Image (cartoon, rainbow, N blue to C red):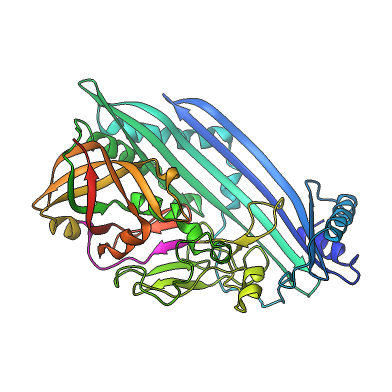
Amino acid sequence: MELLDLAKKVLSWGSDEELEVYLSRNHSTRIEVSDLEVESSNVSTSEGLGIRCIKEGRSGFAYTTVLSVQAAEVALAEARENARFADPDPARTLPQPQGEAKVELASDKAALALPMEEKIEFARRIERAARAKDSRVRKVRQAQYADTSYELAIANSKGLAVAHSGTFFTSSILAVAEDNGNAEMGWSYHFARELAKLDLEPVGEEAAQRALALLGAQRGQSARVPVVLDPMVAADFLGSFASAFSAESVQKGKSLFADLLGQQVAAPLVTLVDDGTYPEGISTAPVDDEGVPTQRTAIIEGGKLTSFLFDTYTAQKEGASSTGNALRSSFRSTPSPGPTNLFIQPGEKSPQQIIGEIKRGLYVTDVMGMHTANPISGDFSVGVSGHWIENGNFVKPVRSMAIAGNWRELLLGITAVGSDLRWVGGIGAPTICIGEMSLSGE
């Protein structure tokens, strides 16, 4: 039975309640190699359905990992029973059908059927490229190739019925360069919705180059100087504070941006966008995980906070409209608002121009401890490595430095935004320069 057919079957059992059925089926392959030998290979399939039942504002949820009529009947009974004991909330409701966003989802299902040995060779190609870059690339911690296919169907008792499917492919590597007893690591990553667009050798070469560039790095002097963030580092920062833009976090008082709507929260040259329709985005889809059409939402525009990210529930509480940002970790969970493809809109300056304007400062290529950042207060204190800049040029690699600050202060302090937008999963950022930050070193 097709996913949407099963969803409609479940809805036919409804009575005087609101019902929603969310079904998914995923198939993935992941391969890791080291020293050109397979370290691990995993082929997995996950499928199931989740049911929400809402009656008189009381919401119940249940799920099953079996896609069958019989299992769905049991899950529906459990969801109804759970709803009986839930606290009533007038904001609990399901969305009306609104159609779908006009997005083109590239798909490459033929590539998924390639022989396992060919997929292993993809991972080996990544490693070979890293090692071929320089004889000092002595180790590869992991060279990974992965592919995923997915199918989703969502239907509810208000007449909503949508389905979509797609594929995506990823490549990554962690390379280690060694010289004179010194070892440094470099990481790189790429994703694409079609295998032909996936970088393999370039990923290996970049990881090697990032590791090689840090050889001989020493701890720098403490200073207060401009700091330039590499796009992948900027994306790491953005991802760590992404939850602050969720309407749920705001309504629970767990966002540093609560009560700041319409105010200047970043430098005027900063525009932050969430776009579920972004071409080739890893999270691009015609609808969110409640079936609401995805859209482009400017969260920060010209430095001013203009919107948060809403699902149906948080929008009802706010008297607003959903921004198409209902997300689920899987069929095992209910939706909550979160980012799709979240990115800082690129500017006009090249990275070389930004670096060339720095008389004395630091270019950060690696950050450690980002998981300790506090998304509620915005405070962070992290270790960094990178390159010291003098008169617009890299003069030496540095490591074991630390920077501390606050996310709001960082955003307000941005003095340049590069043209080189880069994606790490669903988070994107270009090179950015913060006018002044405190570095802790020797």
Note whether 8 is above or below 402 in the view shown. below
> Farthest residue toward the left?
391
Residue 401 colored magenta? no
| Residue 322: % across, % down | 60, 73
Note whether 190 is above or below 22 in the view shown. above
Q: In the rendered view, does 201 fall on the left or right side of 246?
A: left
**Disc count in the image?**
0
Taking the spot 30% from the left edge, 73% from the top edge, the residue there is 268
Query: Where's the C terminus, which quadrant?
Result: top left
| Residue 381: % across, % down | 35, 45
Q: Is the stretch drawn in magenta largely helix, strand or loop? A: loop
Quarter holding residue 69: bottom right
From the viewer's side, name the closer residue of 211 and 147: 211
Quarter holding residue 353: bottom left
From the viewer's side, name the closer residue of 346 and 388: 388
Taking the spot 21% from the left edge, 38% from the top edge, the residue there is 441
Taking the spot 47% from the left edge, 36% from the top edge, the residue there is 144
Q: In the rendered view, does 288 fall on the left or right side of 431?
A: right
> Farthest residue toward the top?
181
| Residue 297: % across, % down | 49, 72
Residue 350 colored magenta? yes
Query: Where's the N terminus, which quadrant?
Result: bottom right
From the viewer's side, name the closer residue of 327 and 6: 327
From the viewer's side, name the closer residue of 178 and 130: 178
Asked whether residue 267 is in view, the answer is: yes
| Residue 139: % across, % down | 35, 25
The magenta span reads 341-351
Taking the spot 39% from the left edge, 40% from the top edge, the residue there is 369
Quarter holding residue 131: top left
